[in-house]
Structure formats: structure tokens, C-alpha cells
Image: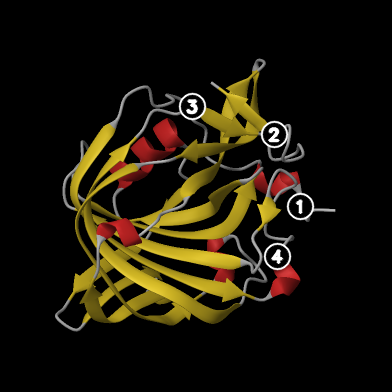
Amino acid sequence: MPLVGTRPVADFASGPLVTAPATERWELPGAGILQLMYEIDSACMTSLLPPALHPTIPPTLVFTVTNVPESPVGSFVLAEVKVGSRSGARPRGLLVRGYCNSAAAIDALASRWGYPLARADCTFAKRYDRIEGAVHIGGRPVLELTLLNPDPISGNDVQYLANLNAARMMRDGGEVPRLVQVDPDYAFRSADRGKPQLGAFDPGAWGLAGASPSFPVSASYCVAGISLPEIRYLADPAKDPLTAVERL
């Protein structure tokens, strides 16, 4: 039998309420996207996911820090740690909790696309020999990412997972937990790969207790125009993967 998530659905009941589901795109030109992927200990591969999702084998975490210089709400830095998963046969990244340094971006991304974000000191830096992203809460590092020795590649060599954001939606007259699918489009200007280095990661700060990165898989940095889409699909975290998907 295929493995499915065993995480209690109650864990998804406190996500942000999507009050204005996106019906038009947001364009984010010239964004810098730093992404690392790590395998994690298989002991937690089902406990991080709800019943609606299958774990990937091997299980993975995807760490992303995105520097957005221009958006409808100004500039911001967005940090995400997503659990590699599958919704049916389709690869997805589950985001339980992320961080951002802009209150305006947090409100807009939550109300329109269900991003479960909190305010934190999110930073991004690009140097000739490395690209770095970090998140600090009260001066304490909860994430530090580095791509070392960047080497140019084609943007066609980079692939990003569509998000499943842990949020709440109004359905049948009440607020219910839903996973909101967000699948942006990317127009690449440049891309690099390099050696991944995970300097700090606090699983509890990301709602991922028990996640233990064990083996680096990849690191990439891209400059791209990001187009955030209208919302079309949701998943009910309590249902099985074959019946969980809903179309708006």
C-alpha cells in the first residue's frame, strides 16, 4: 500500500484565512531565488504530512529564501521550508509555516494565496563566491542557507515544486482547513548551481518537529520574474490523496 501522511488534521486548523482568493496574477520581476534541497531521516516521513499527501521517497525538505525587489506591496524577503510530497501523482511542497520581513506582504500573501507566514528578520546576500539567506527570530537563527561557489547553468535545469499552503477557507458556511495550491510561473534571467550548506535549522520554528536533514541534494540560485497565479485548486488535508483535491 502507498504511504500516506499521519499528521493530525488539527495541526492545520490555525492557518491563515484566505479572505480574497487570488483571481488575478501578481508579477514579481527580478526576484532572486535561493533554494537548497536535503534528504531527511525517514522516521518522520509520514508524521510531517496530513492524510491527503504521500511522502516522497527518499523524504526531503526544500529550503527557499526569495528576495523580491518589486511587488504590488513593495520589496520583501520570503523564507520557506517545504516538505517534499505528492498530491496523487503530482509533486508538491507542503508549507506549514514560513517567514517574511514585510507586514504588508504577509497580509497580502495570506489573504490571497494562503501563505502561512509570520514576521521575522529575513535577510539575503549575494557575493561573488556565495549566496546566503537567513531567518532570525529575536536575534536567534532559525535558518541559515548558503550556496557556495556558484557555477552558471541554464534555467531549464531548475525545477520548483508547486506549493500547498496550510490555510483556512470558507466552505459550506464555515472556516475549514485546506491546502491551497500555488504554482507560480518563472521567466529565468540567470541560474547558478553550487555546493549546499545548511548552517542552522530549527524544525520547531517551521512547524516541522522531528525533521532532521541528513544529506544535501542540491543548491541553486536563480534570478527570475515570478508570476503568482490565480487560485484554482485546494486539497482537504483530512481526505485520502485520491479524493482530497477540490477545484474552485
Where disc 1 sits, the SS reads loop
Callout 2 amino acid: Ala
User: Which mark is drawn over residue 4?
Assistant: 1
Mark 2 or mark 4, earlier in chain = 4
Residue 154: quadrant of the picture: bottom left
Callout 4 amino acid: Met
Mark 4 or mark 3, earlier in chain = 4
Q: Are marks 4 and 1 in contact (CB under 8 Å)?
A: no
Q: Is residue 215 above or below residue 235?
A: below
Q: Which residue is labeled 2 in the image?
A: 244
Alpha-carbon neighbours of circle 2 within 10 Å: few (<14), some, or many (≥20)?
Answer: some
Q: Is 107 or 213 nearer to us in this picture?
A: 213
Q: Are marks 2 and 4 in contact (CB under 8 Å)?
A: no
Q: Can residue 190 be seen here? A: yes
Where disc 3 sits, the SS reads loop
Mark 3 or mark 2, earlier in chain = 3
Residue found at x 48% / y 64%: 62
Residue found at x 53% / y 52%: 95
Mark 3 or mark 1, earlier in chain = 1
How far, Cα to Cα, is label 4 from label 3? 28 Å
Residue 34: quadrant of the picture: bottom left
Q: Are marks 3 and 2 in contact (CB under 8 Å)?
A: no
Where disc 4 sits, the SS reads loop
How far, Cα to Cα, is label 4 from label 1? 9 Å
Q: How many marks?
A: 4
Where disc 2 sits, the SS reads loop
User: Which mark is drawn over residue 45?
Assistant: 4
User: Which mark is drawn over residue 232?
Assistant: 3
Residue 142 x/y as whole percent? 45, 72
Residue 143: quadrant of the picture: bottom left
Q: Is residue 197 above or below residue 69?
A: below
Callout 3 amino acid: Arg
